[in-house]
Amino acid sequence: MNITVADSMSLDSVDYDPIAHLNLLFSHPSTVSSVAAVSTTIQKHKDELSKSIASRETAQAYGPDSSLERMQSAQAELASLFQRIESVRSRALQTERDITIMTADIKRLDGTKRNLTLSMTALKRLQMLTTAYEQLRGLARTRQYRECAGLLQAVLQLMRHFNSYRSIEQIAVLSRNVSELQRELLEQVCEDFEIAFAKGEVSARRAVLVEACLVMDSLGDHAKTRLVTWYVNTELREYRQVFRGNDEAGSLDNIGRRYAWFKRTLKTHEEEHAVIFPPHWRVNETLAMSFCDGTREDFKGILEKSMRRTDGAKLDVNLLLSCLQETMDFEQGLERRFANEPRASIDTLSSADDRVQNFNGSISAAFEPYLSLWVESQDKALGSMIPKYKQQPLIPADEEFSPQAVIPSAIELFHFYKVTLSQCAKLSTGERLLDLTKTLAKYLDEYAQQVLLGFLQRGGPQGPPIEDIILVLNTADFWHTNTDQLEEFIKKRIDPDMTSRVDLSDQSDAFMGAAGASVMALVAKVELECESAWREMRNTNWSRLESVSDHSSYVSELLKHVNRKAEEILPLVVKQQYARTFCDNLVDHLANAYITNVVQCKPVCETGAEQMLLDKYVLTKSLENLMSFHAASSSSQPPASFVKHVNTSMTRMDPLLKTLQVRPSPPEGLVQAYLIHIGDRSDTNFRKILELKGVRRADQAHLLELFAIHREGPAAAGGKLVQSSPLLTPLLNSTSGGLGSTAAAGSSGLAAGLGAGGLQTRFDAASLGERLLTAARDSAERAGVGASTGEGVTINENLRNIGNFFRRDIGGLGARFGRRDITPTNNSRPDE
């Protein structure tokens, strides 16, 4: 194969592709034989290229214009450049030395000129200082104080320029002379003031004294302070002699005389002496603060002496409060007098002006440690009010009942609290206010426990009248709302570091517990009316019932009583959340009472169980309309959440009734029905079901054996049997009793609050307080303390538990029962 010139040229192409070239050369299998020729040709071309490259390198290295020659030339030029740079640097240094030599004489002349100027200035100032000093001495001897004041400032300013020259003897002597002259002027001015005040020549020498104050201002703060201190002591000398040296004049009974004396003194100062002193000295404020400081120390001594008396006479609290109030009025009067502009708050230590004095608390601070006596007096006053409130009638004889009314004692107590807190907040915003808060909290607990719950215990087995219960409910709600407002009122006025220690939430919960107890007392009223209907149910022979009717006669009787009492009670309940809670608890009670009476109706045949199930359905549909008796809830449709609650409560008895509907024969059917509906593994509970159905004891053994076999089977209720049914276990453990509203609530807190250990036939309002006391004593004994120490605390805790229980969501109402409402009852506010 021949290689053409075009093919060889293609090797020099920038875009040369060896694969394409090879494919071109060997495009057919027959061309494979030319591989050796192609390889030889390529090798020759490579050798030619190598020779060409070598010849060109040789020519480049040894030619007349080679790279080596160019490098050598560049190095020679760089060396020449460095030599020129060094020459320039040497010439610059030499030039600098020449210039320095030429300007040295000029610098010396400049220094000489500057020193001469300073010397001339110093000599001129020294001359001025010497002249001014001599003039000042002459003016001081002739008491020309106005000229002295201006000249003294000039002398002191000139003297400051010579502080660095005191090592010179003449300057040191002059400095000592100036200092001595300052001292002489100070003593001379003080002497002039003393003579003028001692001889009563203030008015005659007023002009001299005014100018003398200018001198004292020039002498500095120490001179001004000395003069003002002397003046204040002079003015207050009589006060200290009269009121400190005389027990009668200095007693708390004559506190008004102290303030009257100072008001006269301050008036004299402003009319006769104030023009003497410069306004920026604030001599009147200094005089007032000195009076306050001395009076405060006097009161501290008087109060300490009164507390240490051994004759048995104690400090009169009323006198203490009267003196404190008069003192605070005096302090506020001083504060208003000396305020240059309105202040943000007279209760704060900061001010909008530049004054450093603050008169609030300047004297009254002496009384604060003894305010505990006042707090104790409020404790005694409240302690005497609670027994009185327990004996008062709920409604005055000349007033008629109103559904919105509150017990008058609550209004009176709230007003007492409001006035007391406002008074204490003015006297102290620290520990004493916190102590008073604790005292008020204690009597809030006692009011809830002894007064409100005491009213619920009245009336014997019948309980208190409905109107009385409504008043207790309104009062508990009134205090629940206003207790929260009292807490906010206190937190706004107490010191910020004590805010976290103010907490009346326990008292608020206690009143909510009293409201809950009132609702339960209303439920008990309905329960009492239903007793005859339940008696009719128990007297029915359920074992021989042959057919099922629309509903039993006792159902009509029961609904008649329930609707009549609900129609009587609900219009009197003002707030919708309480009406809803009443209906919820009434439904719970009726559902549990129904189950209780089913147990007491044994034996119950299958037809009887079916009739009971139908009666339950009729009751459920009727109870859904309970809320319609409340004025605020009288809509065409009952709330969906209430309907759901009624159905949930009433369907709890379905497993029992559906089990009783199954015949004991065949026995497997009854066992399977029990496992499906009741769903527990308890032999005792199953035996009680057999007794309810009236199964003979001889037949019970076989059924119990089948029950033991089937409960272990894999198909028994899907293998999810509980050990003991929550419905049957508490019910059948006390078949002689019933299920009260306490157990219905399903709340351990409420059960503890009512002291209910098991089940009861009905809620007895008259025994509520007794149960609380019993629960308190039992808890105290378990805790290892006596009833006298733990009883009150436990009762209050029970009330709070009841209150916490009643704080539950009511769903359809869109609110929470017992929530903290910011709107006070009767539009009362603690800060009015």
Image: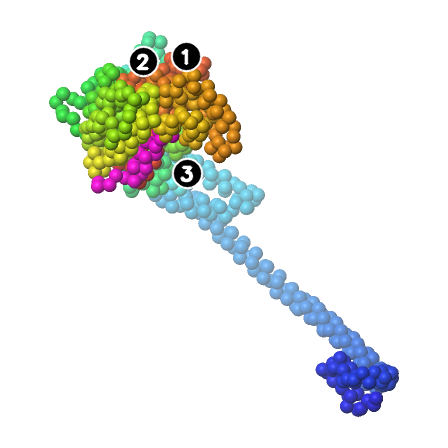
Q: Position of residue 344 (x, y in %)?
A: 31, 40
The secondary structure that most of the magenta stretch takes on is helix
Q: Which residue is mark 3?
A: 221
Q: Residues within 10 Å of mark 3 (few under 14, many from 20)?
A: few
Secondary structure under tag 1 reads loop
Q: Which residue is mark 2?
A: 314
Q: Position of residue 111 (x, y in %)?
A: 59, 59
- Check disc 2 and give the amino acid type: Lys
Marks counted in the figure total 3
Distance of label 3 from label 1 (alpha carbons): 69 Å
Say which residue appears at 25% left-offset and 30% top-offset: 549
Q: In this orientation, does residue 410 appear?
A: no
Q: Nearer the viewer, mark 2 or mark 1?
A: 1
The answer to which quarter of the image holds residue 569 is top left
351 is higher (above) or lower (below) than 561: below
| Front position in the image: 423 or 661 | 661
Q: Which residue is mark 1?
A: 786
* The C terminus - image quarter: top left
* The N terminus - image quarter: bottom right
Secondary structure under tag 3 reads helix
- Which is nearer the N-term, disc 2 or disc 3? 3
- Check disc 3 and give the amino acid type: Asp
Look at the image and give the residue range highlighted in magenta.
635-656
